[in-house]
Structures are given as structure tokens and as C-alpha cells.
Amino acid sequence: MAGQYQKRLNMERWQRERAKLRAQLAEARAKLAQCREAYQILEDAPELNPSNYDHEQVCELNAKMVEAYLAFRAALEATK
């Protein structure tokens, strides 16, 4: 009887630990998705060659870099 009780307690402990690990995994996946988003923003930015830009392209590049910065910052804040 005591053996079955101990098995049940172990199973309950295992289930709680499993649920906690699943939650941590979901959180890590969400953070990874944020990092991928930030990477894609940088990937989509134009090539950095100052002689190849007009004013509109400089403004676009600046906007992309600000967007990437904010995305990375949000991802880093989520890790705290």
C-alpha cells in the first residue's frame, strides 16, 4: 500500500515538473520567434554602402534599424 502511494506521489511530481518544462519550452520558443523577427528585419534592410543611397533610402534604412533595435530590445527584456 505504501509503495503505491509513493508511486502516485512520484507520478504527480513528474507531471508537475513536465508541465513546468513545457511552459519553459513555450516561453523559449516565443523568445526565439522574436529573435527571428528581428533577424528578418535586418536581413530585409538595404546594403550598407553610403554612395548607393538617396535621401528616401537613408530614411528607410534608419526606420529598419530602429525597428530591429526595438525588436531585439523586446526579446532581451523578455529574458529577464
Image (cartoon, rainbow, N blue to C red):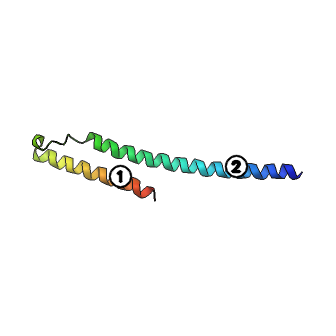
Question: Under tag 1, what secondary structure?
Answer: helix
Identify which residue, 4 or 55, lies in the foreground: 4
Of mark 2 and mark 1, the one earlier in the sequence is 2
In screen coordinates, is 46 left or right of 10? left
In screen coordinates, is 57 left or right of 36? left
Name the residue tied to disc 2: 14
What is the distance, in whole Å, between disc 2 and disc 1 at their CAs?
Answer: 35 Å
For the point 29% across and 51% down, the residue is 67
For the point 83% across and 52% down, the residue is 5
| For residue 9, above or below residue 51 | below
What amino acid is labelled 1 in the image? Phe
Q: Please identify the residue farthest to the right as the structure is shown.
A: 1
What amino acid is labelled 2 in the image? Trp
Measuring from the top left, give residue 60's x and y in whole percent. 19, 47
Name the residue tied to disc 1: 72
Measuring from the top left, give residue 30's x and y in whole percent. 46, 48
Question: Under tag 2, what secondary structure?
Answer: helix
For the point 20% across and 40% down, the residue is 47
- Please rate how many residues cluster around mark 1, counting C-alpha atoms within 10 Å: few if below 14, some from 14 to 19, many from 20: some
In screen coordinates, is 34 left or right of 29? left
Measuring from the top left, give residue 40's x and y in whole percent. 33, 41
Identify which residue, 76 or 70, lies in the foreground: 76
For the point 10% across and 42% down, the residue is 51
Measuring from the top left, give residue 52's x and y in whole percent. 11, 40
